[in-house]
Image (tube, rainbow, N blue to C red):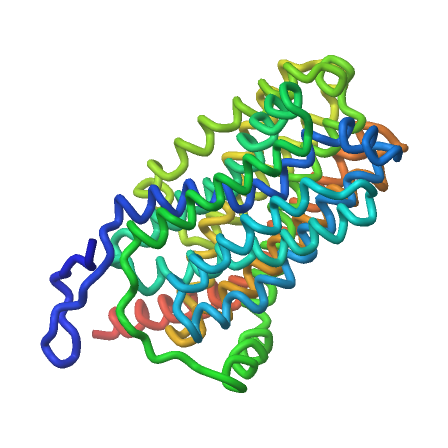
Amino acid sequence: MGLKPSTDIGSIGIPVRYAPPGRVIVILTTTAIAAVGQMYSVLALLPQMAASFDVDSARVTATSTVFGVAYAVGFLAAGPLASRFGPHTVMSVGLCAAAVTTVLAALPSTLLLELVARAGQGCAAAAFAPAAFTYIAESLDPRHRLVALSWLTSGFLGAAAVVPVAAQMIAAAAGWRVVFVVGAAALMLAAAAVVVLVPRPRPMDHARGAQLFRVLVTILGRWRLVALFGAAATFLGGYVSVFTTISLVGPPSVAENPEALQVLRLITVPALLVIPFLGRVLRRWRPARRGAAALGVAAMSVAAGSMSSDSLTALSITVPLLVAAVSVTASAIVESLLAQIRPEETGGATALYGSFTFLGASAGPALASVVSPWGFRIGMLVAAIWLAIGAGLILASSAGTAARRSIQHSTEGAVSSLR
């Protein structure tokens, strides 16, 4: 279970040892589904939870929002902690804490207490993702990192498709509280798998104490990175907003049909599974151009879906396109981010990336709830605009870089012609 040697040679002639990619990718991806899925599980439980707390279903969407906000805040702590104590330790401890808080989320008798429990759950679950990003950046062979990031991102997005379906089935059979009990068991199994099967990374020299804060400040001082973080806040937020809009005010053939909602979520899974296998093709485009184009496709597909107020078939085309585009965007942003930072900034950068991503995701249900009185079409158009803004931010983050490359190529061409 140790790290595998690589052909890369360190500065003192000792081979660099990397973790086995296959096993690590499988464990981290499935764990991502269990951890991040806790945010989305309540999307399938809104009617039952509303009945238990004697409130309107729209108010229960706050349980998703508060989880997302706490998750985003937890990210800011988890990234530096991964640099300080190591990503393996943070993943293991965080998953155990998430299991405990998930059980607690099954107990409240009022919406207020449930919101408190969900906030604690979000903080604990936040430990996994930034630690996983840091682990991949530090412990996998560079040749496997993009594939690993693509699979991990697919796991985060797949959670929004798979977990609500499983939650809906469990709730129908045993009630909404059992969903959290099952989720806690899944998180404990995931923690055991990380502890036993994921090798500990080699020791790394990271910033500590006040240096960690300075790293975050330094990163936020680079406007290109801030633009990427802003784009990260749009892709998952738009994605969640679309599904929440469909659930709240979607076409009657979908919103009022639990089986149709299940089908709509499940047909996104093939799109998520295909994207990691297209890595070689996607790498032909620079990450920023790839991410902006994908978000543009996502925005157009959602805008087109807004016109399909009576068609489950049309949404069955729109939603997989959206999911595939968001999956491409997520890995492209991470790739762009990792290419622009120093090794000692990995923990802080991934923390900020995740924080912005899940702040956007937490705002998604709230935005959908706010615009729901205007109906399905307006809700979808608002989500499309949100996604389009993200595409613009990605382009902005690379505008100066593209110009410099163009000048550099022109200069090199002029010099070559003189020779």
Res. 418 in view: yes
The relative height of residue 83 versus residue 109 in the rendered view (above or below) is below
Left or right of 101? Residue 194 is left
In front: 193, or 345? 193
Q: Position of residue 107 (x, y in %)?
A: 71, 42
Q: Is residue 260 above or below residue 18?
A: above
Compared to residue 282, the image places residue 167 above or below, namely above
Q: Residue at 58% x, 67% y: name it.
A: 76
Residue 202 image point, x, y percent: 26, 69
Q: Position of residue 218 (x, y in %)?
A: 54, 80
Instruction: Please name the residue shown 55% across and 38% down the image.
Output: 183
Give percent across and percent down for residue 341. 43, 71
Tell me, yes or no, if residue 328 can be seen here.
Answer: no
Query: In the image shown, does 314 or 367 lie closer to the viewer?
Result: 367
**Left or right relative to 144: residue 228:** right
Q: Give the residue displayed 67% in from the left and 51% down from the top.
A: 68
